[in-house]
Image (cartoon, helix red, strand yellow):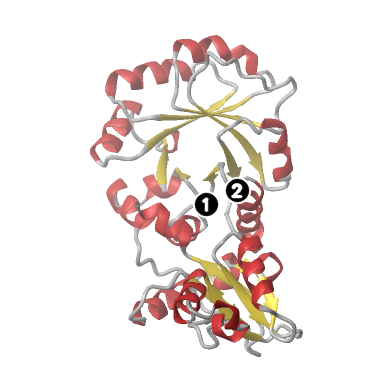
Amino acid sequence: MKISASIYSDKKRSLKEVIHDLMDHKVDLLHVDCNDDLSVFDDISQIRTWCKIPIDLHIITENPSKYFDLLRKNPVEYLTFQYENLKEPLNIPSDISGKRGLAVITPTSIDVFDLYSDFDFILIMATIPGQSGGNFSKIRQFRAKYPNKSIHVDGGVNGEVSFILRNMGVSSSVSGSYLFSGPSIGHALMNLTNRDIESYYCVEDFMIPLEESPKDFIETCTTKSILQAVENGNVGFTLILSQKNEFKGLVSSADIRKAVLKKIDHLAAIQPEDFINTNPIRIDGSATVFEMLQLIKKCSFPIMYLPVVNSQQNAIGIVNFVHLIKGEI
């Protein structure tokens, strides 16, 4: 996950000092907020003489068209317009370069992105991502509906939230006060990219909930229905439950492969129980992220999917680590 440093969050130093500090620490992007202020482009012009770090420009305006000539003269790598402020159609001319994004605040439905399906990413604005699960849910919804689009997040991103966002497949997070208020930018960046963060968010805050998880039922499942559940889920696994949602096991693509290899000469003899791992590693939804990481570290084998249960051993969701692995490559 890229860290986009909000350059105007440091009120104590000159812009040039801030940029050089960010250069020294090799930050990924420079986040430039433009609250309907054309003079921001003077700063962008100056920044271009100091460094080559990609610029992540976020424009809040009623009239995007008044910025188009400035964007032609001062091209940026990432260009985002705030959806809620628009009073005219957002039709960005094709000769304006850079990846295009739409910023939305928490109450706005991600469905508004349908109007901008040719854009590259969404920027989800929040004071505290994940408060009451709101923005974690919004991230999941967007990922499910637009799997080929990138997700950026702005607001309340600290070390523990950063780990969760990386696990959810967020491509970029904007960091302002957290980045500049600590002992140093380097210290904050280390926390934002740490793989061993002591987060006290609960697993149930960011897991894929049961209603969004692929599943099949032990009482009625067949070889075909299990394979179909894995295929339809498009995430490489399916949960196996009882009709009362009691957790009965997990079927992953690896489990299917092992069953096929075991009975390769008698494929017609494969039964549902050949696929089901009835005793996979699982975790209680009330466990903290820190406890989850400690559990994973104790395992002698890699974990791609972690079923989540409640105190009655009923399934309530699953944690998928595929996005986190991709983000670390």
What residue appears at the point 64 percent right and 49 percent down from the top-left corner?
142
| Mark 2 → mark 1, Cα distance in angstroms | 7 Å
In the picture shown, does residue 188 fall above or below 269? above
Q: Which corner quadrant of the image does residue 203 belong to?
A: bottom right
Q: The residue under label 1 is which amino acid type?
A: Gly
Q: Secondary structure at mark 1?
A: loop
- Few, some or many C-alpha atoms within 10 Å of disc 2 (few <14, some 14-19, many ≥20)? some
Vertical placement of residue 240 versus 305, above or below: below
Image disc number at residue 245: none
| Position in image of residue 152 (x %, y %) | 52, 43
Q: Which residue is mark 2?
A: 126
User: Most extreme residue toward the front, as rendered?
Assistant: 265
Answer above or below: position of 73 versus 17.
above
Left or right: where 92 falls relative to 193: right
Quarter of image, res 317: bottom right
Q: How many marks?
A: 2
**Residue 308 spot, x, y in % from top left:** 58, 77
Q: Nearer the viewer, residue 204 or 12?
A: 204
Is tag 2's residue or tag 1's residue first in the polypeptide sequence? 2
* Number of the label disc, if any, that sits on residue 156: 1
Looking at the image, residue 139 lies above or below residue 268? above
- Whether label 2 touches label 1, CB < 8 Å: yes
Q: Residue at x 62, y 12 (%)?
A: 66
Name the spot of residue 292 as percent of width and height, x first.
Answer: 45, 76
Circle 2 — which element?
A: loop
Query: Label 2 is placed on what type of residue?
Result: Ala
Residue that lies at the very extreme toward the left in this rendered image: 24
- Residue 79: horizontal and vertical position, in percent? 52, 27
User: Few, some or many C-alpha atoms within 10 Å of disc 1 (few <14, some 14-19, many ≥20)?
Assistant: many
Nearer to the camera, 116 or 108: 116
